[in-house]
Amino acid sequence: MVSKRTMIARNGAGRLALVLFLLIGSVAQGSEPDAAPTGPSLANDPVLSDFVRDALATRPEMARAQAEVDAERERVPQARALPDPMLSFGIQNDGFRGIQIGKMEGSFVSIMASQTFPWHGKRGLRGDVTALGARQAEADADRARLTVQAEVARAYLDLLLARDQLALLARLEDLWSQAEGMARVRYETGDGAQSDLLRAQLERSRLKQRRWALAAEEQRRIAVLNRLRGHTVDEAVATSRSLADLPDPAVPEVAAAWADAETRSPELRRWQLDQERSSRLTDLARKDTWPDLTVSAAVMPRGGDFPPMWQAGLSFPLPAWAGSKQSRAVAEGRLRETASLQGAEATRQLLRQRVAERVALLDALVNTNRLYRSELLIQSEVTVTSTMAQYQVGRIAFASVLEAITGHVADLNAYLESAAAAQRLDIAQAEVSLDADAGLAAAGMSGSPVPGAGAMGAGSSPSAAEGSPAAAGGQGPGSMKRM
């Protein structure tokens, strides 16, 4: 006669076979390339666009940069203006016994006006130099604008990641609830150990602790975003998207990305303008070897019956010390022009390096994201379902359930990190940043579990903990180097 336990085992084995059959079919179907998200890109996100608009209108950095531009522009007409004319009054008198004007022929009052005229071309060159300084200030303002836009985009992205990880924590809590229920049933029927039930309860309690930490991190991200857009730090920020909803950034051709970056880079444009400005200063130094001319005219009334006298004059400085003054200024201008040329070349080389790095990393991350969507996440979820089904019928130990749940949540979080890292690279490319992004992208491909999930498995290895967002470059919600 077949025992009740044997019948239960047979029924469980039958159910397990059915579950495995369905799971294998789902894996085979899910292994086909999955369609990428089709929503608006991060750059076209309407919520982010509103945040950026607020930031550009309220950030003091933008107001300061615009004030610098306006101040430099005010210098241009000053540089092109003529020197102020000079008006002088004087008296010439014979002797010290009294005023002799009208009495003595050599006594008179003088009224003189003079005007200095710079040598032809000097005023234009001085105006060009100051105008180029204003254009350099405009390049600085462009850098401030790009930086503000990038900071807001990164803050918005970090808030999405924090909220996605909170949702992932809810998914993790649901899995542990299922595992606890299975462990309880097996313990009550005498098929499982009490330690399995206690371990599941322990992990659920740990999740409460982590939820508080993630909730605090979410509030910190909200405060950062509100500061950047000029709102009160405790104002609520509504978001409706997930990182999984964002399409992967397009991977550009390296040559096209180089051309775009060199066209938009404020640092490179500033060096190029500095080179042009140094060239104008050199031309101005050459012009300074030619003297400025001062024209003067005076009238000298003598009073009495004496007719008035008049005077006209032309004066100019002699370049007696041109060897140690004007010629040295020409040499200085040439050296500064060379320095600016080399600075522009160094910036161009670094810019090309950063662009090439980002294109390579972005290509790897986009392919990684596709692999997650088409295979890894599906296989990971199937593994959890299969493992829990096998544990339910007593085929495997509870440690396998721990490992499967930990691995599944790690895959989900690694996908979120990879998606965020790809978006960060796209933000850096739009910012035309010269900063390195290698650590940032590596964090997105680390495959780390959700922060705090490393303690779930009994056999969690040190490498898993080291691969957490806090350890892998500090780019996860737990740590932000840029803020």
Image: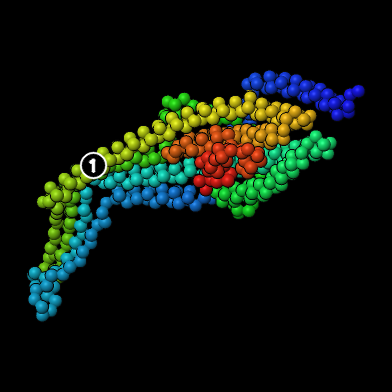
In the rendered image, residue 48, in percent from the top left (x then y), is placed at 59, 40
Going 23% across and 62% down the picture, which residue do you hit? 87
- The one of 418 and 323 positioned closer to us in this rendering: 418
Please tell me which residue is depicted at 41% across the width and 48% down the height of the picture.
69
Name the residue furthest front: 1
Q: Is residue 126 left or right of residue 48?
A: left
Q: How crowded is mark 1: few (under 14 residues within 10 Å), some or many (20 or more)?
A: some
Can you say which quadrant of the picture contains the N terminus? top right
* Residue where numbered disc 1 is placed: 335
Left or right side of 373 for 398: right
Would you say 122 lies left or right of 397 here? left
The picture places residue 234, in percent across and down from the top left corner, at 63, 53
| Residue occupying the point 52% across, 48% down | 483
Determine if residue 55 is in view. Answer: no
Where residue 413 appears, x then y in whole percent?
Answer: 62, 36
| Amino acid type of the residue tagged 1 in the rendering | Leu
Q: Nearer the viewer, residue 70 or 312?
A: 70
Q: Which quadrant of the view contains residue 97? A: bottom left
Q: Where is residue 230 in the image (x, y as percent from the top left)?
A: 56, 51
Residue drawn at x 36%, y 37% is: 347
Instruction: Look at the numbered disc 1 and give the secondary structure of its residue.
Output: helix
